[in-house]
Image (cartoon, coloured by chain):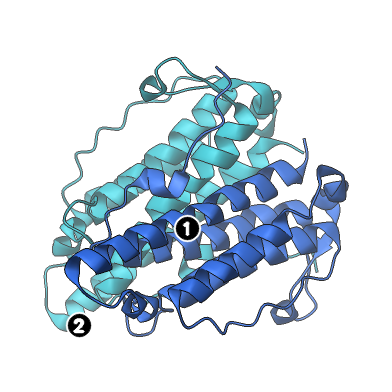
Chain colours: A blue, B cyan
Amino acid sequence: MNLYDATVPVFTKLLTGVEKWLDKATALATAKKFDVETLLTARLAPDQYPFVRQIQSACDQAKFTVAKLTGKDAPSHPDTEKTIAELRARVKTAVDYLGTFKPEDFVGAEERACSHTWMQGKTLRGGDYLDHFALPNFHFHLTTAYAILRHNGVDMTKMDYIVDLPFKA
Amino acid sequence: MNLYDATVPVFTKLLTGVEKWLDKATALATAKKFDVETLLTARLAPDQYPFVRQIQSACDQAKFTVAKLTGKDAPSHPDTEKTIAELRARVKTAVDYLGTFKPEDFVGAEERACSHTWMQGKTLRGGDYLDHFALPNFHFHLTTAYAILRHNGVDMTKMDYIVDLPFKA
C-alpha cells in the first residue's frame, strides 16, 4: 500500500476528464451561439471562485499534494489563464507534472510532515494531510467547477466526473 | 496504515459538519422570512438531484463504503426525509453507523473485493474502490449539496466543508 495509488492515478484521471467537460462546454456554446469564454468567469455565488479559479485550484491541489507527500518543491503555476485554450494547457501542465512521479517517490509519505505557509508552522502527518485536507480540497474545487458547468446547461453526468473504474473482473 | 483512517473519521467529521450547514440555512430562512424546507428541493440544474438527495447520497456513500470495505451488510436507510429535522436525523443515523466501526474491522480491506448490484458482477479491489469510487462520490455529493446552499445565499466558507485539521503541532 502506497499513497501513490490514492493520488497520482486518481488526480491524473479526473483532471484529464476536464478536457471532455471543456469539449462539452464548447459544443453547447456553438449550439446556443454564445461565447464559450464567458463560462470561465461563471460562478454560483458572488463571493465564490469562478469556474477558471476552481479548475486552477484543483490543479494546484493535485500538484501540491504529490509534492508535499514526497518532499519535493512544487513548481509555480501562476493563475493567468484567460481562455479555454489556456485552461486546457494549465490542466495539461498539472497532468504532466503528476506524470513525473513514481510509486517509490511515496515511500514514507504517510508519516512525512506536510505543511503550507498558511498553516503558520503547524504540520500534518502525510496520511492526515491526504485524507483530511488534500482529497477533500481537490474534490471540493473540481466538483464545484463541474456544478458551475451543469448550472449553465452543459450536458454532463456524474460519470463525466468519475470517468471510469479499474474493475478487476 | 489502515483504510479506517481514510474513511470513518473523515466521513464522520464531514457529515457532522452538515449540522452547522443546516443551522446556517435555518438562520438565513429566519432572517429573510422564507420557509427553510424549500431548500430541500433546491437544485442547480433540472436534471440534477436536489439538496435533500445529495445529502442522502453522501450518507449512503459513507455507509456503503465502510460496509463494503469490511465485508458487512449495510443497513437500509430509505430516502424518505421531507423536512430539515428528518434530514438531520438521517445524517445522525449515518454518523451513528460509522461509530460502530473500529480500525481492526478494516484489516485486509485494501484487497477485499468490493462491488454494488449495478456493477453487474464486476468487482474492485478495496483500495481502488475507495480511491476511484467511494471518495470521489462522497465528496461529489457533499460538495454539490454545499454548492446548492451557497447558490441560495447561505453564509458558508470552504472551512464549513473541511471543518478542521488534525495538526501535529
Instruction: Tell me the amino acid under the disc marked 2.
Output: Ala
Q: Nearer the viewer, mark 1 or mark 2?
A: 1
In x, y percent, where is residue A34? 23, 76
In x, y percent, where is residue A58? 56, 65
In x, y percent, where is residue B130? 57, 37
- Which residue was labeled with disc 2? B31
Badge 2: chain ID: B
Circle 1 Cα neighbour tier, 10 Å, few/some/many (<14 / 14–19 / ≥20) = some
Position above or below: A95 against B59: below
Badge 1: chain ID: A
**Residue at 65% from the left image edge and 66% from the top image edge:** A93
**Residue at 18% from the left image edge and 77% from the top image edge:** B30
**Residue at 33% from the left image edge and 65% from the top image edge:** A26
Residue sitting nearer the eye, B25 or B65: B65
- Which residue was labeled with disc 1? A19
In x, y percent, where is residue A9? 65, 45
* Residue B8 horizontal side relative to residue A155, left or right: right
Q: How many labels does the image show?
A: 2
Residue sitting nearer the eye, B140 or A39: A39
Circle 2 Cα neighbour tier, 10 Å, few/some/many (<14 / 14–19 / ≥20) = few
Residue sitting nearer the eye, B127 or B47: B47
Work out which quarter of the rendered image holds the N terminus of chain A and state it: top right
